[in-house]
Image (spheres, rainbow, N blue to C red):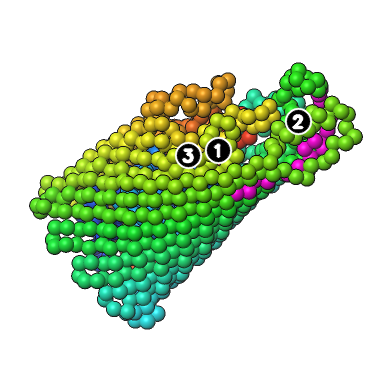
């Protein structure tokens, strides 16, 4: 019924236009009728300048356009940015990649290669950015190493998210968005002066929820829904023309009841276990959106933040900026550990992240030919982790189901049915994995741009980083039932099963300390007012760290730093009487000791493979071409088009993990493509608006994004491949500019394409779970602005 009503409303919008007669345009409409593209202003180099003047491969997303398209999280933002990959099925597993580089975050000890900054504050865990975007001014996506400009080094690139500031004139907005599958989103903003010319405030909030579309056949419930709320409050104090202070406090909560991965491939091991216990595995087809779980999971994240930005204009040419910030992030996840309706295992994961950062930055000019940035940066972070795994009455029979021949041959134990396996061998047992990691980052960075002649700019930057991390992890086992009373052979075999399946006591403490110099050299030349060419060399660095997990004999307890050397040539141009903009970049990036996840063989007979240990890949090379363009084809018709080709390959990787079904553990992947690295990606969109009688205006837009297929895990096992897909979104609306209201109908995934957004290696040697993308959804959005 809801689909019928929403579709009917969407189809009625064009008919509302049919009887309208074009009338004299209002001044607001006339201002938008010019055949000139709007200028895009950025602060990527800590000064306001047009994006076409920045000699970097850069994509800028306007916050108002993102709101109109309903793109309110980074998972959706990747539809607008070529070369950006956002992976992960929840906040703990979030990973961001640029140019095929960096989209890995499954080990809690790993930092991101793509740095994420919100109002100048670095988010030390990528999961902090895996929440809804609220009241955004713009997002600047900078490709390539950016360490000489930002507080924390970024070896792959940076996402610079800028929120809207308080205003000294009153403004307000409300938005309500309704769609299929119970989609309900409410967003609001209120801004204005609290003391004329001196103090202004801004308050933004959202409430978002949706029902699940995955059916749990074990109990008939619907899984995969979401529920989230967020709030941001700001104060802007400007006591005089030379000083300003901006205080920001924010809160966000996300709850994902029954958030599940769906089986995309079962290993031979899992099929053997299921056959032994007589369990019918659901078909490995994630697009049926069906699971059988006895313990539907739920995930909850909470985060809070407080930042204070102070700006002093010491004179007309020099500004001192201080950004002090604190953030905390709590993650809690309850999951079915085996992905079946059997009582095998369930897990309870808790993470607590705390960070404090301080940045001092001096920006200015010296005469008319020199611009500079000099900064000091400090970051302190702490992560506490607690994981509990509880085993049930079916666990013992499940774990021996693929080892029956080994038990007979080695220990003389002959199980012919699951009823012969005493459930008390593992029933009630509990594993605990505890850990703590602390990190300190210190940096001195600077960048200088010199124009020896009017059209030539030479840029140099240098950064010194010092990193220290220390931490410990432990494993313990308790709540074991006594084996007294079992036959002697079962007592011996049962103790062996416990020792191998649960593992013994484990404790490890590690620390690293390292420093690094990285830098930038570049030159740009303005051939005329419309054409800028540039060339640059940059060196990026990401610190090493601690393998924050139990490791086997094939993995070291720590991993080395990651270093990227990038060469880039580009041209930025405006043409066709300022009606078109086209940016083109060609790059090569060589990475030493690329940090990646490995898939280690099991250390013992019953133990599963170790999935999330970190290793350093010897050498990786990225090559590619990027095109980004915008066109004003008509006074009321805009087109954007972006295209990227990326050739991301391992140059040297002789100790790589093999696909699980290959029967071997070590392979040479030299020359193969990286995982999470699509070769081609494209994004395009058309926006049109048309004035009507009575001050009304109709508008519409079509957006399309495409990417070729790629493997979602390093070992590239069957079931971990994400096929090519293209998504089409459509919107059509009616608004009145002078009254500030609009009503819009929209369709996401218009052609109901089947696609995968995340892949994860599950328990077992070659089991993969995936998160399918959203099906086609139809909805309506109402907006009011003042």
Alpha-carbon span between mark 3 and mark 1: 13 Å
* Viewer-closest of 311 and 91: 311
Q: Residues within 10 Å of mark 3 (few under 14, many from 20)?
A: many
- Of the numbered discs 3 and 1, the one sitting upstream in the chain is 3
**Residue beneath label 2, please?**
496
- Of the numbered discs 2 and 1, the one sitting upstream in the chain is 2
Question: Which residue is farthest right?
Answer: 485
Label 3 sits on a secondary structure element that is: strand
Q: Which mark identifies residue 559?
A: 3
Alpha-carbon span between mark 3 and mark 2: 32 Å
Q: Give the x, y percent position of residue 409.
A: 76, 17
Alpha-carbon span between mark 2 and mark 1: 25 Å
Q: Give the x, y percent position of residue 346.
A: 69, 43
Q: Is residue 408 left or right of residue 193?
A: right
Q: Residue at x 26, y 76 (%)?
A: 241
**Residue beneath label 1, please?**
612
Select label 3 or label 1 by which is in front. 3
Question: Which residue is farthest bottom?
Answer: 195
In the image, which residues are magenta?
A: 415-435
Q: Quadrant of the C terminus?
A: bottom left
Select label 2 or label 1 by which is in front. 2
Does the stretch in magenta take in 421?
Answer: yes
* Viewer-closest of 629 and 273: 273
Q: Residue at x 90, y 34 (%)?
A: 485
Q: Give the x, y percent position of residue 759.
A: 53, 37
- Determine whether label 3 and label 2 are within 8 Å by CB: no
Q: Residue at x 87, y 28 (%)?
A: 488
Q: Which mark identifies residue 401?
A: none
Q: From where the camera sits, is residue 746 visible?
A: no
- Of the numbered discs 3 and 2, the one sitting upstream in the chain is 2
């Amino acid at each position: 019924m809801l689909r019928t009503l929403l579709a009917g409303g969407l189809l009625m919008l064009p008919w509302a236009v049919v009887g309208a007669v074009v009338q004299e345009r209002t001044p607001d409409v006339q201002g938008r009728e010019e055949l000139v593209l709007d200028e895009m202003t950025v602060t990527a180099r800590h000064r306001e300048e047009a994006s076409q003047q920045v000699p970097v491969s850069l994509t800028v997303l306007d916050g108002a356009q993102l709101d109109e398209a309903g793109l309110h999280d980074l998972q959706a933002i990747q539809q607008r940015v070529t070369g950006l990959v956002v992976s992960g099925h929840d906040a703990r597993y979030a990973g961001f990649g640029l140019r095929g580089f960096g989209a890995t975050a499954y080990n809690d000890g790993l930092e991101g290669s793509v740095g994420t900054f919100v109002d100048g504050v670095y988010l030390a865990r990528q999961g902090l950015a895996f929440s809804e975007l609220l009241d955004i001014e713009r997002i600047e996506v900078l490709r390539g190493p950016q360490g000489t400009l930002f507080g924390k080094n970024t070896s792959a690139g940076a996402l610079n998210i800028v929120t809207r500031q308080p205003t000294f004139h009153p403004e307000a907005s409300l938005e309500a968005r309704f769609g299929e599958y119970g989609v309900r989103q409410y967003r609001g903003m209120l801004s204005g002066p609290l003391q004329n010319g001196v103090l202004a405030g801004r308050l933004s909030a959202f409430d978002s929820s949706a029902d699940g579309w995955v059916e749990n056949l074990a109990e008939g419930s619907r899984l995969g829904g979401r529920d989230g709320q967020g709030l941001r409050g700001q104060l802007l104090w400007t006591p005089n023309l030379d000083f300003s202070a901006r205080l920001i406090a924010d809160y966000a909560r996300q709850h994902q009841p029954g958030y599940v991965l769906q089986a995309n491939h079962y290993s031979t091991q899992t099929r053997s276990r299921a056959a032994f216990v007589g369990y019918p595995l659901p078909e490995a087809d994630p697009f049926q959106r069906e699971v059988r779980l006895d313990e539907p999971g739920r995930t909850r994240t909470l985060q809070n933040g407080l930042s204070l930005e102070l700006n002093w204009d010491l004179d007309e040419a020099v500004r001192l900026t201080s950004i002090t910030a604190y953030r905390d992030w709590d993650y809690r996840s309850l999951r079915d550990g085996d992905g079946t309706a059997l009582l095998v295992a369930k897990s309870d994961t808790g993470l607590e992240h705390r960070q404090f950062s301080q940045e001092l930055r001096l920006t200015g000019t010296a005469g008319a030919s020199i611009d500079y940035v000099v900064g000091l940066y400090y970051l302190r972070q702490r992560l506490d982790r607690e994981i509990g795994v509880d085993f049930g009455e079916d666990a013992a029979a499940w774990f021996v189901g693929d080892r029956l021949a080994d038990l007979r041959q080695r220990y003389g134990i002959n199980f012919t049915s699951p009823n012969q396996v005493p459930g008390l061998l593992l029933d009630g047992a509990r594993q605990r994995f505890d850990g703590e990691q602390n990190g300190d980052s210190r940096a001195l960075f600077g960048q200088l741009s010199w124009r020896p002649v009017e059209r030539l700019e030479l840029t140099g930057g240098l950064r010194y980083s010092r990193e220290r991390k220390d931490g410990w992890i432990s494993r313990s086992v308790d709540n074991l039932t006594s084996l007294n009373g079992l036959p002697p052979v079962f007592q011996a075999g049962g103790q062996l099963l416990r020792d191998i399946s649960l593992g013994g006591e484990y404790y490890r403490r590690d620390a690293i300390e390292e420093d690094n110099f990285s830098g930038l050299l570049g030159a740009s030349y303005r051939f005329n007012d419309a054409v800028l060419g540039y060339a640059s060399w940059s060196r990026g660095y990401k610190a090493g760290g601690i393998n924050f997990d139990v490791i086997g004999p094939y993995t070291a307890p720590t991993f080395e730093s990651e270093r990227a050397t990038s060469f880039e040539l580009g041209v930025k141009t405006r043409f066709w009487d300022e009606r078109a903009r086209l940016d083109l970049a060609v790059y090569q990036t060589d990475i030493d000791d690329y940090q990646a996840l490995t898939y280690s063989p099991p250390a013992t007979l019953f133990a599963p493979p170790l999935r999330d240990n970190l290793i350093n890949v010897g050498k990786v090379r990225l090559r590619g071409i990027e095109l980004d363009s915008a066109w004003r084809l008509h006074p009321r018709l805009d087109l954007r088009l972006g295209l990227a080709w990326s050739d991301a390959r391992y140059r040297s990787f002789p100790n790589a993990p093999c696909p699980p079904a290959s029967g071997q553990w070590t392979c040479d992947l030299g020359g193969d493509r990286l995982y999470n690295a699509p070769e081609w990606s494209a994004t395009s969109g058309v926006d049109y608006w048309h004035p009507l009688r009575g001050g009304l205006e109709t508008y519409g837009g079509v957006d399309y994004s495409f990417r070729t297929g790629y493997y979602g895990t390093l070992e590239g096992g069957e079931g971990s491949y994400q096929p090519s897909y293209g998504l089409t979104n459509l919107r059509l609306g009616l608004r009145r500019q002078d009254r500030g209201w609009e009503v819009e109908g929209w369709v996401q995934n218009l052609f109901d394409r089947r696609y995968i957004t995340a892949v994860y290696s599950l328990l077992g040697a070659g089991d993969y779970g995936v998160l399918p993308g959203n099906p086609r959804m139809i909805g309506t959005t109402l907006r009011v602005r003042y």
